[in-house]
Amino acid sequence: MKNKVKIVDNYLSKENFKTIEQITGSSRFAWFYCPHVASIEDKYGFYLAHTFFDKNQAFSAHFKDISFLWEPLNARALLRVKANLYTSTNKLIVHSPHKDYPFENQGMVYSINDCDGYTLINNKKYASKKNRAIFFEAGEYHSSTTCTDTEVRRNININYIK
């Protein structure tokens, strides 16, 4: 999949999409402060995250509730599953390019809401559109952004080995 990007709109059924939307939009869903988006050098912005799974263990009570999100991937190994929440900014901020891991791995960015934020991969913008999955080689450089036209940008990032 190196340098190839695949877009799947309407990735989940309406019912499963609604489940993710309700879980991550609930006032009881725990979002945690992260002072830097891509690296310590990032001087602009912060984000909130919720780790469902990392380092071979579940960290969230909701991990099994959204397993339908990664089950179709048929991954040999799940590396990380985390939700991201970027707050609205007056001007769109493009975060520093980064690699999720220093080795080859697959990535999926799943958008929970529509907004003018996007994911930048190979200098191409991929819009945040609700229920859209973007598949790409996450061992390659890519960037995220904030949004300016909605209160927040919410997505779920999944890293895995095919």
Image: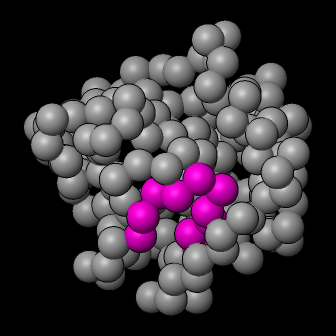
Is 110 left, or right, of 84 in this rendering? right
In magenta, the rendered stretch is 126-135
> At which x and y percent is residue 61?
80, 23
> At which x and y percent is residue 120?
33, 68
**Magenta stretch: helix, strand or loop mostly:** strand
**Residue name at image x 13 percent, y 43 percent:** 91
Q: How many marks?
A: 0
**Residue name at image x 41 percent, y 70 percent:** 126
Is residue 73 among the parts visible in the rendering?
A: yes
**Residue name at image x 57 percent, y 39 percent:** 83
User: Of residues 105 and 158, which is closer to you in this image?
Assistant: 158
Q: Quadrant of the C terminus?
A: bottom right
Is residue 106 among the parts visible in the rendering?
A: no
User: Of residues 80 and 134, which is closer to you in this image?
Assistant: 134
* Depicted 17 relative to depicted 152: above or below: below
Q: Is residue 134 magenta?
A: yes
Quarter of the figure with residue 158: bottom right
User: Of residues 139 and 92, which is closer to you in this image?
Assistant: 92
**Residue name at image x 26 percent, y 62 percent:** 97
User: Of residues 117 and 94, which is closer to you in this image?
Assistant: 117
Q: Residue furthest top?
A: 28
* Depicted 123 relative to depicted 13: above or below: below
Quarter of the figure with residue 148: top left
